[in-house]
Image (cartoon, grey):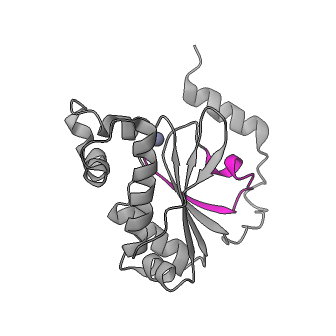
């Protein structure tokens, strides 16, 4: 039986040509147009979703797109060093992380991811897709209030910050329209 890794490596080698080590090619400049903070869900891939090419999107993904310290630092790097002027928080319907956050019996080992989601949702929300919209809005708000470079750029309107929900059933993208309150 072929392992998944062996198959992926084989696919890579068939698709991508490499140049000899003694004749290296040029390294493209790192000038992404936008930063995307999205969920790790395998069905939500930002680059094809935005019809973008390699190098266009600075992408940060973790289950439930939580604005952790490391995520915010990565956004500071994208805005402050790479010059990104657009930050997109990308949630999606049927999100497993948000579903787990609504489940009181979820694995305690997931607490570091689920607690910030739960804290922002508060009590009374049981519908996953409603919770996803709320969590995307909460993540947008956390970035907008962040004291670092990315948050300042948003507050000073040097960078645009948006939230959107990708609908897995329709393939559509719903931008969130809640106004930002700093
Ligand atoms: Zn998800």
The relative height of residue 91 versus residue 167 in the rendered view (above or below) is below
Residue pictured at 60% horizontal, 28% vertical: 6
Would you say 63 lies left or right of 35 here? left
The quadrant of the image that shows the N terminus is top right
Q: Residue furthest bottom?
A: 156
* Lateral position of residue 53 relative to residue 37, left or right: right
Residue shown at the point (50%, 82%) measured from the top left: 153
Q: Which residues are magenta?
A: 45-62
Q: Is residue 63 visible?
A: no
**Spot occupied by residue 21 in the image (x, y as percentages of width and height):** 72, 57
In this view, the residue in front, 136 or 96, is: 136
x, y percent for residue 178:
49, 62
Q: Residue at x 61, y 45 (%)?
A: 45
Residue 124: quarter of image = top left
In the image, 62 versus 20, the foreground residue is 62
State yes or no: residue 26 in magenta: no
The quadrant the C terminus occupies is bottom left
Quarter location, residue 70 = bottom left
Q: Is residue 7 above or below residue 37?
A: above
């Amino acid at each position: 039986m072929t392992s998944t890794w062996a198959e992926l490596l084989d696919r890579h080698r068939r698709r991508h040509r490499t140049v000899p080590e003694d004749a290296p090619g040029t390294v493209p400049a790192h000038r992404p147009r936008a930063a995307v903070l999205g969920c790790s869900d395998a069905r939500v891939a930002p680059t094809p979703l935005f019809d973008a090419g390699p190098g266009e999107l600075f992408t940060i993904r973790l289950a439930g797109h939580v604005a952790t310290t490391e995520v915010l630092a990565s956004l500071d790097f994208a805005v402050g060093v790479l010059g990104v002027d657009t930050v997109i928080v990308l949630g999606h319907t049927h999100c497993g992380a948000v579903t787990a956050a609504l489940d009181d019996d979820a694995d305690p080992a997931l607490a570091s991811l689920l607690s910030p989601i739960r804290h922002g949702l508060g009590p009374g929300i049981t519908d996953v897709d409603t919770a996803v919209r709320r969590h995307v809005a909460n993540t947008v708000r956390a970035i907008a209030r962040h004291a670092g470079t990315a948050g300042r750029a948003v507050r000073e309107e040097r960078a645009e910050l948006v939230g959107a929900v990708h609908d897995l059933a329709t393939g559509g993208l719903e931008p969130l329209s809640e106004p930002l309150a700093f």
